[in-house]
Amino acid sequence: MKRATGDSRRGFTLVELMIVVAVIVTIAAIAIPNLLRSRMAANETATIGTLRTLATEQALFVKQAEVDQDSDGVGEYGWLCEMAGEVCVRNIAGTPNPTPLYTVYITQNLATGGATGTGYGEKSGYMYRMYLPIVSPTGVAADGGDDRNTDGTPTTWGTPLDPMAVRDVINMQENNFVCQAWPVVLGNTGQRCFVVTPVGEVFGSKMTNQTYNGEARQMDDYRFCFSSDGDGSDGWWNDRLAAGGVVPGNDGNVYNPAQ
């Protein structure tokens, strides 16, 4: 229908619409990567803070002797699920505590699902896993591992170590832990992996060699971040952290103080 004389109303032409779309696409192409980088930076900063807090809470956990498997008055470090009050803590051999901790040490976001869970905590776009000195499913002292058996099945929570058989392992649990954090989606929720030990300082790696991404992880014990040129590499937590850009870790990555 012919537009009335003097009617100034008209639609956009195809060329004008194409120009508008092009402008929107250009703005999005600039803004979205910046937004993604900002989100990853925020996630990494939050993860560094969480690991520092976790190291502090582990120190309190030991001081309170929430776990004392050999009943010597000196506590052992805890698994994430124990510290989150998700499962019963280990105690004197044969007599695990009947209930989980009432006063928890860490957020439930870091709980790992207990005996039927994945073994991973998750918070702010990062996954977490705790490593302690362990005994293998065959009863032989192992180098140290995370909160799952070597065949990938969950451990039996609340089952303590026998101080008459593996007191050396218990003593190692009084002094050592490693907690690792890595992106849920590498390049989307974060770009670096991080690690903290009882020293309390957080170290990070840009993962220029081996990468960690969601549940697709290539190394399943604490030695990923330690060098192999320590004091004999006897596998009992004596090697030094691969920090300072000098010697890479067993995963080929170098770990530096996280900022």
Image: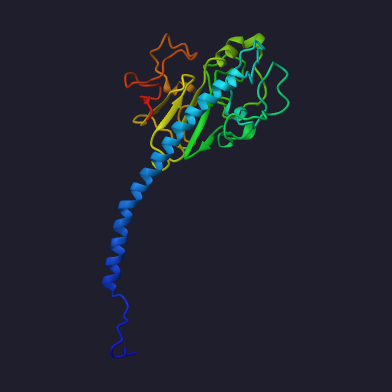
On the image, which quarter does residue 14 sit in? bottom left
User: Residue at position x 57%, y 22% from top?
Assistant: 60
Residue 127 pos. (x, y %): 49, 35
Residue 138 relative to residue 54: left or right: right
Residue 114 pos. (x, y %): 63, 32
Q: Is residue 46 above or below residue 136?
A: below
Residues 182 and 55: in front is 55
On the image, which quarter does residue 151 sit in? top right
Residue 30 pos. (x, y %): 30, 52
Residues 214 and 153: in front is 214
Q: Is residue 77 above or below residue 167?
A: below
On the image, which quarter does residue 96 sit in? top right
Give the quadrant of the C terminus. top left
Residue 243 pos. (x, y %): 37, 21
Label count reads 0
User: Residue at position x 28%, y 75% from top?
Assistant: 13
User: Residue at position x 38%, y 37% from top?
Assistant: 191
Q: Is residue 133 above or below residue 182?
A: above
